């Protein structure tokens, strides 16, 4: 990946378009849908044979405030409350202007996608993810990122948006005034194409698949299982370094402390939010599971063997049946059921007394209405009971949260804080709203930025092109 100084005599573009979008995940597709409202001629360049990205591997949950889906469920929420939740989780390390605009536009974007592009959103009900003070997660019926991507691809097809797949963008061409003049992309047959543009949007996600960058910025996760898209090679970061763009929070990332392995299936944190716990191979709990699933990844990996067990009951099991990922885990026999603690201790080779002590402390917390020694407050109506459901999980790196610093319109800034003339970024390519590490990630931050800032960047680019 390189930034090439543009030479009009040497670099002859085979064609030129008003808008080029690099990346065909949720961010790129939503950007294209937003720009298409202004009848902008464009193309989305996607490196894979089929557009998937990290969205495809996610649960597909997008937080949004003050939506009609919330109203129908009797949920009272506001952009101000949502912004406060985001900032409280990231310890006020994120750019407040970006946080505010994402919260303010979130409901509008979700309803626009539902109304204009038939994305079948619904509200996730029944529990709150860590850090959210209201139910505001929106998803498609199957609760998978795969379904979200499918609906977005259908929408872009209906809108007549061109997506060129198997098109790996390798170079950006920049002139002496920091204008991006075009890109070079390669295809599997070895051919190279030079494509000019008036405006470029980078929707190429982060650097989770680039081990060199992981070792540089996230050395604590270099041995973690990477459960993200391998195409996330940090292209935007590398181009940004060469362009002299401002890069922020490159040490931020989203982990997840509940990946069933095998079969590498995401197990929803709804397990913990409804009373489930994690125990290590010694039968002991080791953290407050309600702190957040991102920071839990490193805690899980720090346990002996790097694997732990999710422990829950029939009540929680029934609620998880709505999640397709959980159904996949069931189909591979990853979920074990034990009639009592004795059977569980025997099968998992644990000390039964330690297991009993672990559950006793949970009950004491609920009865006394006080936190346990790890800081978690249990409540009586969520205490787990036999039979016990158990699934082995590990911690994983999902995606990085740092990147190109942008304005509230999605325009990339240089090291002096000035916007590049015609370069935009959103989603994982841009600086997120999770602060500087793993503890600042609020559930849904990744898709919030991809979808909402994607829409903002697409509309802003279209306005610039139309002027």
Image (spheres, rainbow, N blue to C red):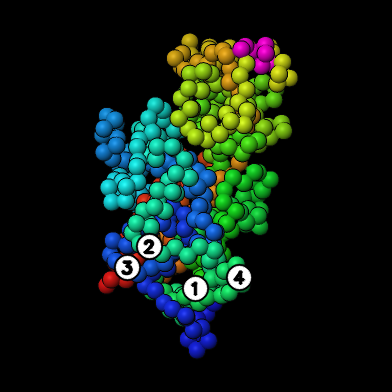
* Real-space CA distance between mark 2 and mark 4, rounded to the nearest whole angstrom: 24 Å
The residue under the point 48% across, 10% down is 367
Looking at the rendered image, the quarter that the N terminus falls into is bottom right
Furthest residue toward bottom = 9
Q: Could you tell me if the residues under marks 2 and 1 are in contact, i.e. CB atoms within 8 Å?
A: no
Badge 1 or badge 4: first in the primary sequence:
1
For label 1, the SS is strand
- Percent x, y for residue 139? 39, 40
- Percent x, y for residue 136? 36, 37
Q: Is residue 121 above or below residue 451?
A: above
Residue that numbered label 2 is attached to: 161
Is 53 placed left or right of 285 in the picture? Answer: left
Foreground label between 3 and 4: 4
Q: Which mark is residue 189?
A: 4
Q: Which mark is residue 40?
A: 3
Q: Is residue 159 above or below residue 303?
A: below
For label 3, the SS is loop
Badge 1 or badge 3: first in the primary sequence:
3
For label 4, the SS is loop
In this picture, which residue range is highlighted in magenta?
339-345
Q: Is residue 375 above or below residue 104?
A: above
Residue that numbered label 1 is attached to: 183
Q: Could you tell me if the residues under marks 3 and 2 are in contact, i.e. CB atoms within 8 Å?
A: no
Dot 2: few (<14), some (14–19), or many (≥20) neighbours within 10 Å? many
């Amino acid at each position: 990946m390189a930034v090439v100084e543009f030479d009009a005599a040497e670099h002859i573009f085979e064609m030129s378009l008003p808008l080029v979008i690099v990346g065909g995940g949720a961010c790129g597709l939503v950007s294209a849908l937003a720009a298409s409202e202004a009848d902008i001629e464009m193309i989305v360049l996607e490196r894979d044979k089929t557009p998937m990205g990290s969205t495809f591997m996610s649960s597909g949950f997008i937080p949004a405030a003050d939506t009609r889906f919330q109203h129908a469920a009797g949920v009272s929420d506001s952009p101000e409350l949502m912004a406060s939740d985001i900032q409280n989780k990231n310890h006020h390390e994120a750019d407040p202007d970006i946080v505010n605009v994402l919260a303010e536009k979130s409901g509008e974007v979700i309803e626009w996608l539902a109304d204009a592009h038939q994305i079948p959103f619904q509200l996730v009900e029944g529990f709150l993810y860590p850090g959210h003070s209201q139910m505001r997660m929106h998803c498609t019926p199957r609760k998978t990122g795969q379904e979200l991507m499918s609906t977005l691809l259908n929408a872009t097809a209906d809108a007549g948006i061109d997506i060129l797949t198997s098109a790996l963008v390798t170079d950006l061409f920049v002139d002496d005034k920091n204008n991006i003049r075009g890109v070079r992309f390669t295809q599997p047959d070895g051919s190279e194409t030079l494509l000019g543009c008036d405006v470029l949007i980078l929707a190429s996600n982060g650097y989770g698949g680039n081990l060199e960058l992981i070792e540089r910025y996230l050395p604590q996760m270099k041995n973690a299982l990477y459960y993200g898209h391998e195409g996330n090679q940090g292209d935007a970061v590398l181009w940004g370094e060469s362009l002299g763009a401002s890069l922020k929070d490159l040490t931020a990332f989203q982990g997840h402390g509940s990946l069933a392995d095998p079969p590498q299936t995401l197990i929803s944190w709804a397990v913990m939010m409804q009373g489930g716990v994690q125990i290590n191979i010694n039968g002991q709990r080791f953290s407050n599971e309600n702190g957040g699933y991102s920071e839990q990844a490193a805690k899980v990996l720090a346990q002996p063997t790097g694997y732990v067990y999710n422990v829950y009951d029939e009540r929680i099991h029934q609620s998880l049946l709505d999640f397709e990922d959980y159904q996949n885990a069931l189909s591979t026999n990853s979920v074990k059921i034990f009639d009592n603690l004795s059977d569980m201790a025997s099968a998992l080779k644990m000390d039964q007394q330690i297991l009993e002590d672990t559950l006793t402390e949970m009950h004491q917390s609920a009865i006394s209405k006080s936190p346990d020694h790890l800081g978690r407050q249990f409540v009586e109506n969520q205490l787990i009971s036999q039979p016990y459901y158990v699934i082995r999980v590990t911690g994983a790196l999902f995606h990085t949260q740092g990147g190109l610093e942008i304005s509230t319109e999605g325009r990339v800034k240089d090291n002096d804080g000035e916007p590049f003339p015609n370069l935009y970024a959103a989603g994982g390519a841009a600086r997120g709203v999770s602060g500087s590490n793993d503890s600042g990630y609020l559930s849904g931050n990744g898709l919030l930025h991809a979808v909402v800032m994607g829409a903002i960047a697409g509309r802003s680019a279209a306005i610039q092109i139309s002027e």
